[in-house]
Amino acid sequence: MSKSLIIANWKMNPQTLAEANRIFSSIEKGLRKIKNKKAEVVICPPFQYLSVINNQLSIIKLGGQNCFWEEKGAFTGEVSPGMLKDLGCKYVIVGHSERRKYFQETDELVNKKIKAALENNLNVILCVDKVSQIKKDIKGLSKKQFKNLVLAYEPVFAIGTGRPCSIEKARKMSALIRKTLKTNIPILYGGSVNSKNARGYLKEAGMNGLLVGGASLDPQEFIKIIKAAA
C-alpha cells in the first residue's frame, strides 16, 4: 500500500446524530490541516448515521460496521451489502470479535458475508484474533478477490481494555499472517490503539494501517493517530 489505512470503528457510539456530526466535522477539519497526507481515512459509524455523514464526505471514506449475506428478503433488522454501497460505503467490517462473541457469528457466517460484500464491490476489513480463523473465513475466494480484502489482527485481550498487544507480538503475527496467506494483502492492527503506540505498529511491527475503536471518538486523539501514520 502506498498509504496507511486508518479506520475508525465507532461501534454503537455516539448516542445522537448531533454528536456524530460534531465528531465527524472535527476529524475532517483536523485532517485538512495535515500537509503530508500519507493515510487513507475511513470512518465506520452506526448504520443510521451513514446517509447524513455521506452527504458531508470529501477527503474521508465511509464504511459499514457489519452486513448480511443476502441482498434482500425477510431478514428483520439486517443490512445488505447493496444498502451499504447505496449509502456511499466503500468498506465494510466483517468478523469483528464482538460480532463473534455476542452474536455467535461462526467462520461459516463470516465467509458468507465476505463473499456477499465482495460481490457488491465493497472492500472487506476481515477481523481475526487467531491465524486459524483466516483460511475458514476466506474459503472459496479467488486471488482476484484478495485485491479487495484487508485483514485486521485484533487480539481479543486488547479490544477495549487499554492493554494493547506488544509491538513484537504484532510484528510476529503480521509475518505469520503473510506466510499463511501467501499473498501480500494489507494487514492492520486493532486493539487499544492510541496516539502513543500507533507509530510503533506501523513502523516497527510493519502493519499497513490501524483499526481504531474508542480513540476514534476523540477527534484530537484520532488526528494524532493519523499524523503518526503520516
Image (cartoon, rainbow, N blue to C red):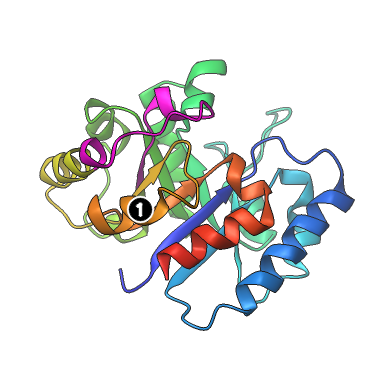
Disc 1 secondary structure class: strand
- The C terminus - image quarter: bottom left
Most distant residue in the bottom direction: 35
Q: Answer whether residue 21 is magenta in the image.
A: no
Q: Position of 199 compared to 69: left or right?
A: left
Q: What stretch is highlighted in magenta?
A: 151-170
Residue behind mark 1:
149
Q: Position of 179 compared to 48: left or right?
A: left
Residue at image coords 67%, 35%: 73
- The N terminus - image quarter: bottom left
Q: In this view, does 93 lie above or below 169?
A: below
Q: Answer whether residue 152 is magenta in the image.
A: yes
Residue 21 x, y percent position in the rendering: 81, 58
Q: Can residue 62 be seen in this view?
A: no
Residue 15 x, y percent position in the rendering: 83, 38
Badge 1 local density, few (<14 within 10 Å), some, or many (20+)? many
Residue at image coords 29%, 36%: 166
The amino acid on which the numbered mark 1 sits, given as a three-letter code, is Leu
Residue at image coords 67%, 33%: 78
Tell me the quarter of the picture where residue 202 sits.
bottom left
Q: In this view, does 78 lie above or below 18?
A: above
Residue at image coords 61%, 49%: 216
